[in-house]
Amino acid sequence: MFEGRLLEPRLENLARQHRKTVAFFKIDIDESPVTANRFGVKVVPTVVLLKDGVEVNRFEGGGLSESEIGRWIEENMRK
């Protein structure tokens, strides 16, 4: 199964949990190549965390568990 499809339900759950503090956006790189290029997306899936419009961190691939992604978000939002 495509890694993005595996990651999607985890991100949807986290979006619900963090809805008051974090906005989640899904970009189709085939439909939005300019946006993908702007963020330097080379691997799908790529998750980019922005704070005040500035990239704080990113990860590629779908190997992280929901709890690992949640910790990653919380740790990076404190930066």
Image (tube, grey):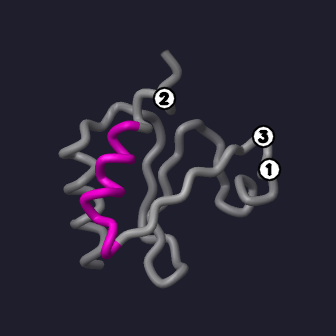
Contact between labelled residues 1 and 3, with CB atoms less than 8 Å apart: yes
Relative vertical location of residue 1 with respect to residue 27 in this rendering, above or below:
above
Q: Is residue 79 left or right of residue 8?
A: left
The disc labelled 1 sits on which kind of residue? Pro
Residue sitting at x 78%, y 40%: 30
Res. 33 mark? 1
Question: Callout 1: helix, strand or loop?
Answer: helix
Q: How far apart in space, not on screen, are marks 1 and 2 (Cα)? A: 19 Å
Residue sitting at x 80%, y 50%: 33
Pointer 2 local density, CA inside 10 Å: few below 14, some 14–19, many at least 20? few
Question: Callout 2: helix, strand or loop?
Answer: helix
Earlier sequence position, callout 2 versus callout 3: 2
Front residue of 23 and 59: 23
x, y percent for residue 28: 68, 44
Main secondary structure type of the part rendered in magenta: helix
Q: How far apart in space, not on screen, are marks 3 and 1 (Cα)? A: 6 Å
x, y percent for residue 57: 42, 63
Q: Quickly name the residue at label 3.
A: 30
Earlier sequence position, callout 1 versus callout 2: 2
Contact between labelled residues 2 and 1, with CB atoms less than 8 Å apart: no
Q: Is residue 11 left or right of residue 61?
A: left
Res. 5 mark? 2
Q: Farthest residue toward the top?
A: 1
